[in-house]
Amino acid sequence: MVPLGFLAVFFVWPVGAIIRLGLDSGGVAAVLGEPATWRLVAFTLGQAAASTLIAVVAGLPVAFLLARCALPGTGFVRAAILVPFVLPTVVVGLAFRSLMPAGGVLPIVLANAFFNVAVVARTVAGLWSHLDRRAEDAARSLGASRLRTFTSVTLPALTPALGSAAAVVFLFCATSFGVVLLLGGARYRTLETEIYLRTVELLDLSGAAALSLLQLAAVVSVLVIGAIARRRRETAMKLRGRVESARPPRAGEWAVVAAAYGVVALLLVPIGSLVLRSLSTPDGWGLDGYRALAGTGFRGSLQVSGIEAAVNSLRVATDATMLALLLGVVASVVLVSLGRGRVRAGLVDTMDTALMLPLGVSAVTVGFGYLITLDALPGDLRTSAALVPLAQALVVTPLIVRMLLPVLRSVDDRLRQAAAALGAGPWRVWREVDIPLAGRSLLAAAAFGYVVALGEFGATSFLVRPDTATLPVVIGRLISRPGELNNQMAYAACTLLMVVTVAVVLLVERLRVTGAGSVGEF
């Protein structure tokens, strides 16, 4: 009841209130009947499909490198591809803006693909490492080329992982907010940014509600497909068991390895461009942007200094991570317990999918729902400092569940049975067996959740007050205001956020348990 109760109060109720308000005000049918609405849907789905295709094509050679190649430096590759996934959206948006100042469709598609290569690579590598090479070797001995062996033997076996990864990547790309807002401007809009525009600037609640209904239907469909694919992937991994498939590359495999390192190099280009841009000044190279973070920007553009915004970010991210950890651990324990009992698998999958819903619904919809519903709770949370951590915890909790759940499911039941036979009760079994075995993944999930909360932009930009703005919100405001100093401050703040992100990624990789709990376990 704890995770479901939190989901009901802080997700279902606010979103339902927004939809009901929009339906009561009328005009939903008119919005759905407008050709512009369906052009918006087409662009949203089209750019998401294009980004997903690029992420899958780029992620496959990296997955091969991680799963099948025994080479020095694979740890660096694993960490390098994870950095883009956890970078704040405003950081990635500005990084691609520094490379493609004109913006447009191509930067949007590339930026969304940049985010999600890690999801494909790590998810597919998890299953690929379980495949026995002997089937491929048999096909090769019968005269099949490397390409035919891959398409006829390997690719069909990887289909469950590819389907699971593609569903999640498509969901992330379709609901992208910060990237589209920074790179698309007023010309290119998705459902997510249009909901923001209609809610915040036009106050068109009926239109926002209609678009939210469309987005919710699409999100639920993708989550159901993802849950089915994920179940097939987990079943395939259990049936195959773990085999030792990594070895030094041979002959034509070096071309795939080269392609994988090429993808990694391309992923580092926007990051390097961002760092260089943060050091660029009208007079050459310098640290003007970093020094200016102690102030409030060109002609007082901000109500807080960059340093104060950084402190706000650290405080809010800490609160959100603690709450998300509590909810994520409880939810994971419940899902594992239900899976071991006599509960039907369909019910477990339904609860699992329900916990993932906040990842796909507009953060703006949730934020506006908070403002019209939470006054009914004791203390009127709308004016409370807890409002932003609550919204961030809603986003972080599903990610923590996805990291912890595979680890807890992999714990051998015989260890629990032995502890129970020695007189340990159910809670002591969890405390003495499961939690110690999952301890490293729990720390990794906490670090990962912290950096995601630190860079959260969508809901925070809508809920935070100007005098308590976080660093991502300050970056968004700086880049939208005139003045070269503001631009320098924005790029400097992005670089600092990126440094923190890289440090956390290295910590996560150090704590990573091989074969379980990776970030790609969606």
Image (cartoon, grey):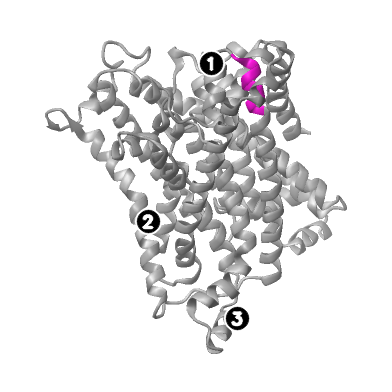
- Give the answer, above or below, for where 86 lies relative to 461: below
The total number of labels drawn is 3
Which label belongs to residue 135?
3
Q: Which quadrant of the figure has residue 308? A: top left
Q: What residue appears at the point 38 percent right and 64 percent down from the top-left corner?
A: 259
What residue would you read off at disc 2?
264
Q: Which quadrant of the figure has residue 233? A: bottom right
Q: Are marks 2 and 1 in contact (CB under 8 Å)?
A: no
**Nearer the camera: disc 2 or disc 1:** 1
The one of 38 and 269 positioned closer to us in this rendering: 38
Give, as a single range, the part of the protein colored magenta. 204-212
Distance in Å between CA atoms under marks 1 and 3 = 57 Å
Which label belongs to residue 29?
none
Q: What's under tag 3, amino acid-wise?
A: Ala
Q: Quadrant of the N terminus?
A: top right
- The secondary structure making up most of the magenta span is helix
Q: Residue 466 in the image: x percent, y percent?
A: 44, 13
- Give the answer, above or below, for where 442 lies relative to 187: below
Q: Does residue 207 belong to the magenta stretch?
A: yes
Q: What's under tag 1, amino acid-wise?
A: Val
Q: What's under tag 2, amino acid-wise?
A: Val
Classed neighbour count for the residue bearing mark 2: other residues with Cα under 10 Å, few (<14), some (14–19), many (≥20): many
First in sequence, mark 2 or 1: give its number: 1
Distance in Å between CA atoms under marks 2 and 3 = 29 Å
Q: Is residue 46 left or right of residue 427?
A: left
Q: Is residue 454 left or right of residue 123?
A: left
What is the secondary structure assignment of the residue under circle 1?
helix
Task: Residue 335: tell me if it is visible.
Answer: yes
What residue would you read off at disc 1?
200
What is the secondary structure assignment of the residue under circle 2?
helix
Q: Residue 501 in the image: x percent, y percent?
A: 41, 41
Q: What residue appears at the point 63 percent right and 69 percent down from the top-left corner?
A: 157
